[in-house]
Image: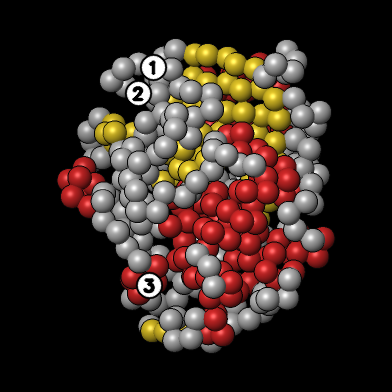
Amino acid sequence: MRRISVVTALIVLTGTTAAASPPGGGLQRSTDAIHALGAIGVQARAVGADGRYHVATSGVADLSTGRPVPPDGRFRIASAGKTFTAVVVLQLAGEGRLRLGDPVERWLPGVVRGNGNDGRRITVRQLLQHTSGLQDDIPDYATEADFQRHRYDVYSPEQLVARALANPPAAGWHYSNTGYVLLDMIIERVTGRHWWDEVRRRIVGPLGLTGTSWPGDSPAIPGPHARAYQPFEAGPPIDVTEQIIPDPGSAIISTTQDLNTFFRTLFSGRLLPPAQLAEMTRIVPVAPELAALLPGARYGLGIFQRPLPCGGTYWSHPGGWGGYLTDNGVTADGRRSVVLSVSSVLGTGPDDYVRQQHAADALVEGTLCAAGG
């Protein structure tokens, strides 16, 4: 996950079979609340156990034109893409083509070496669970000048891993984008195909996720979308829509409809065999600093477990990068879900990110509770 941030009109759209029920009204109020914090554009989609859905939007999609947020708009899903990678790895494990206990060295010999990092002592499971100790040095933009100068830079996976290996390993649970870069490389080594080809073949195609794509080295977002905004230093929000995301898995583009379908299908047991879904949902505590951002969170393999304020738990993988923040939630049986996309970052400090993430969580958790707890 990365830094994230949030202005006036509102639209409520419901599906032709959607009922006027508390989840719909609550979804709109929560969407408006995020907009009221300063978010420029907000869209959310909730799906109930009966398959009926509610969509709410607030704010504008483009500050220069004032056009409304499209209810089916596409956005970069950032760290939510880790769940796609995890599903492919777990499918390969279920097929006997790799083991979660395999050392990274088996698949990527000599790749993870240096400064105490050693692929002979790091397993596939540890990459999935963020317990490998690998730190990140994925390029980011501290100033507007940095953004303008480097937004079209392209990095190979090997370059990203090499940057990370300049750092000594971290102790304990440590969120690592680099670990998922390595997992994508392992998918390619095991299958002989590009990691995205495997995601498309195993998930995107079979589920009919027509709004989901991977841009490669293109800086554009295809189809309808709200433009993304991010402030730098003390300045106003800058349009950062057009850029190449250095971390390949975080560059996946999708829609709230497609992500609802993906998470619901996953937790209904139709993407993974029972043994592999059980592995995915075996949880460990996260680092204290992340627990402050995501209260009560535990991590499985490519997915967070979170507590619901009305009792019970839900599964989620929020993320933010390139001006977009996404949050989501699905019940353990896959019957109720909600996906949120915010197309701006509130500010440049950690308190801004916490404030925005907690507002996103309030929408997700409030919607799931209103839909049945």
Q: Residues within 10 Å of mark 1 (few under 14, many from 20)?
A: few
Q: Which of 348 and 159 is in front in this view?
A: 159
Q: How crowded is mark 2: few (under 14 residues within 10 Å), some or many (20 or more)?
A: some
Residue 202 in percent (x, y) is at 65, 56
Q: Distance between the residues labelled 2 and 1?
A: 6 Å
Query: Does residue 306 lie above or below 364 as drawn?
Result: below
Q: Tell me the residue at 65%/34% (across/down).
A: 338
Q: Tell me the residue at 52%/63% (across/down).
A: 195
Q: Which amino acid does label 1 sit on?
A: Arg
Q: Nearer the viewer, residue 296 or 300?
A: 300
Q: Which amino acid does label 3 sit on?
A: Glu
Point out the tag, 3 or 2, that comes first from the N-terminus: 2
Circles 2 and 1, Cβ within 8 Å, touching? The answer is: yes
Residue 323 has which mark? none
Asked if residue 280 can be seen in this view, the reply is yes
Tell me the residue that label 3 is attached to. Answer: 158
Q: Which amino acid does label 2 sit on?
A: Asp
Residue 113 in percent (x, y) is at 42, 84
Tell me the residue that label 2 is attached to. Answer: 62
Q: Distance between the residues labelled 3 and 2?
A: 36 Å
Q: How crowded is mark 3: few (under 14 residues within 10 Å), some or many (20 or more)?
A: few
Tell me the residue that label 1 is attached to. Answer: 67
Q: Tell me the residue at 67%/69% (across/down).
A: 92
Q: Identify the element where label 3 is drawn.
A: helix
